[in-house]
Image: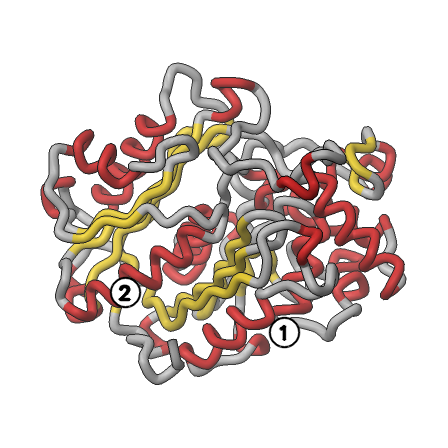
Amino acid sequence: MSAMNFPRGKTAVVGAATYGMGSAPGHEAIDLAVHASLKALADAGLQPSDVDGLFTTLPQDPFSSLSMAEYFGIHPKVTDNSRTGGSSFQIQAMWAALALEAGLCDVALITYGSNQRSASGGLVSSGGTPIVYEHRYKPMNPPSSYAMAAARHMHQYGTTRKQLAEVAVAARKWAQLNPEAFMRDDLGIDDVLAARMVSDPLTVRDCCLVTDGAAAVVMVHADRAKDFPRKPAYLLGSASASWHRSIANMPDLTVTAARESGARAYAQAGVAAKDIDVAILYDAFTINTILFLEDLGFCAKGEGGAFVDNGGIAPGGRLAVNTNGGGLSCVHPGMYGLFTMVEAVEQVRGTAGARQVAGAELAIAHGNGGVLSSQATAIFGAEETL
């Protein structure tokens, strides 16, 4: 999709919510997604019966959108349950924007839920088949794949374990400003470095949380956006790119397809990295944040470690990154991409409470799926950016 074809600012999020953050025993994944949806719809002053575009992904249900429609008792005109992992939701926002602009639907709901913590206490498979050429070596995926990327970045650019730890510590400091964050206790550099090693060089504190949680956003055409109770967050650009499935086929372990998705999203939005006020990046592992800061243009390739060093992305740093606490300290229920969008919307609307970035008008929400496989970038702006 060329920049000229994307309906820049023609659609907006008018409702956003999370539910069951951390641990929500007694709920199925679909229950959590429904609760988040009801909160997001209420935020917009709408009912489930108003939804005629339904975009959803549930961890173990390949018919997610059909199940959700049945649960709500609605008959949507447009449904989608794209499965590219944690990047699914930025991609769904792109399809929702196109559907709204084309008049195929009037109210689009994007939702996700997972009970992976309370159901099993560990990672829940999303139904993907093992990668045959890697499976025989019994990798501990996904950590082993991300550890390979981290090790390569350290070898090639001199990135240090301390700099990886800076990412985790910054996320925790933001989480301490977020009452919904699952982990809010103090965390220092030494704590991260001394934590249990999971897959060298990543310790358990370099790895995302295992939580329950759900999120939802409601999108409408911009012509209607001001008719709703809350300040709209306009979708200015949304693009995706996929370069591989297995980590063994990643051309360069230090360069992700975010370089492509970000460039196209910026072109659609008519902005550049220097214009972004808040960056909400999919931080399943600490190396992710460094890679995406580089590939999305916030610093040059190889300079991500220096960029995050000494509190560079913590509160008061050079760039506000993962202001909700991210997947490392706030929430990570299997797929985290929709939570990045909710936080970006909250920042643009000015409703993020103690963690609100003053004057935030442009926010980027970046999703990652697989083992650095699928990348998707969405840019949200306040009315002043139109």
Above or below, 140 relative to 83: above
* Sequence-first disc among 2 and 1: 2
Q: Is residue 25 left or right of residue 47?
A: right
What's under tag 1, amino acid-wise? Gly
Count neighbours of disc 1 (C-alpha within 10 A) and say few if under 14, some if 14 to 19, many if 20 or more: some
Q: Secondary structure at mark 2?
A: helix
What's under tag 2, amino acid-wise? Ala
Q: In the image, what residue occupies the spot 68% across and 43% down? A: 133
Which residue bears the numbered disc 1? 297
For residue 18, say whether it is visible: no
Q: Nearer the viewer, residue 381 or 87?
A: 87
Q: Is residue 53 left or right of residue 306?
A: left
Point out the image quarter for the C terminus.
Answer: bottom left
Pinpoint residue 13: horizontal percent, then vertical percent. 29, 58
Pinpoint residue 151: horizontal percent, then vertical percent. 83, 52
Which residue bears the numbered disc 2? 97
Q: Secondary structure at mark 1?
A: loop
Q: Nearer the viewer, residue 308 or 269?
A: 269
